[in-house]
Amino acid sequence: MLRLDFFSGRKAQPIADDSPWEVIDLSNLPQHIAVIMDGNGRWAVSRKLPRTAGHRAGMSALKELVTTCGELGIQILTVYAFSTENWKRPVDEVGYLMHLLVEYMEKELAELHRKGVQVRAIGELAELPQAAQKALNKAEQMTRKNTGLKFNIALNYGGRREILQALRQIAQKVKTGEVDLEQIDEALFSHCLYTAGLPDPDLVIRPSGEQRLSNFLLWQCAYAEFWTSTVMWPDFRKQHLLEAIRDYQKRNRRYGGL
Ligand code: IPE
Ligand code: IPE
Ligand code: MG
């Protein structure tokens, strides 16, 4: 049985007899993990299933990811669920994804709340279907005072879109005289992003073999560590997360210094 003793000290207990990832250093966990949940469609097609089956299986992988992050004591998890470019897909697939989001919230919200998870949606939410907006509002309201894992779901999210809306906010403040040009700095800019108040991701995980950001957290990922895997998102398990964290712990983050 998989068992991690996360509260025993600096080193975790062996994860599992059959696991190659024996220990992770609990004193050096990434504070913020961001995940690009990719590969649902290919997972399904390789099994001769409709792409929608891959999205449904991806929902189970998400459930496991949130649980593991909570157990590990990860502070912030941000998942990429639907990009501003994903509207290009067939209308049926988009509809299914929106339906799955509502279903996920209906099924999982009570449990997330019980575990102290704080849910936040990031992206241009006003363009989502009413049912999705309603489900997200409910989740945010119910969990807003929770102090456990901060769980951000990026929906109708685009990094460029986010940067442009921040720019508009700041331009407006300059126009009204609330902000001087000299006052525009990284802190002010970060404050105008959807992720205001959150530290930047330390670790970005992308399954499915793709090695690109696909418009995810462009500003915030300036110094994030990137970890990719050929596993498709629906097959992403606890051990993949632990492998990613373990690899992250071997990195030397120099931030341009020596
Ligand atoms: C990720 O899986 C889910 C979304 C982008 C919404 P994909 O649907 O992109 O799966 P692939 O990349 O086609 O396999
Ligand atoms: C990125 O995956 C978006 C999400 C996972 C939500 P895509 O499948 O849309 O990205 P590309 O098209 O491969 O770059
Ligand atoms: Mg994809």
Image (spheres, grey):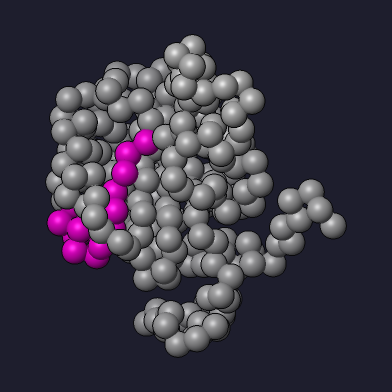
Q: Is residue 111 magenta?
A: yes
Q: The N terminus is located in which quarter?
A: bottom left
- The residue depicted at 57 percent of the width and 22 percent of the height is 180
Residue span colored magenta: 108-122
- The residue depicted at 65 percent of the width and 41 percent of the height is 222
Where residue 67 sits: x, y (%)? Answer: 33, 63
Q: Is residue 174 magenta?
A: no
**Residue extending farthest top:** 175
Q: Is residue 109 above or below residue 163?
A: below
Q: How many marks?
A: 0
- The residue depicted at 36 percent of the width and 54 percent of the height is 150
Apparent side of residue 64 relative to residue 250 in the rendered image (left or right) = left
**Residue extending farthest right:** 258
Which of the pair 233/247 is nearer the observer? 247
Apparent side of residue 169 relative to residue 153 in the rendered image (left or right) = right
Which of the pair 150/132 is nearer the observer? 150
Q: Is residue 86 above or below residue 194?
A: above
Where residue 34 sits: x, y (%)? Answer: 49, 48
Q: Is residue 135 above or below residue 243?
A: above
Which of the pair 189/106 is nearer the observer? 189
Can residue 56 be seen here?
A: yes
Q: Is residue 25 above or below residue 111?
A: below
Where residue 199 sits: x, y (%)? Answer: 51, 50
Q: The C terminus is located in which quarter?
A: bottom right
Where residue 145 sits: x, y (%)? Answer: 24, 55
Can residue 82 be seen here?
A: no
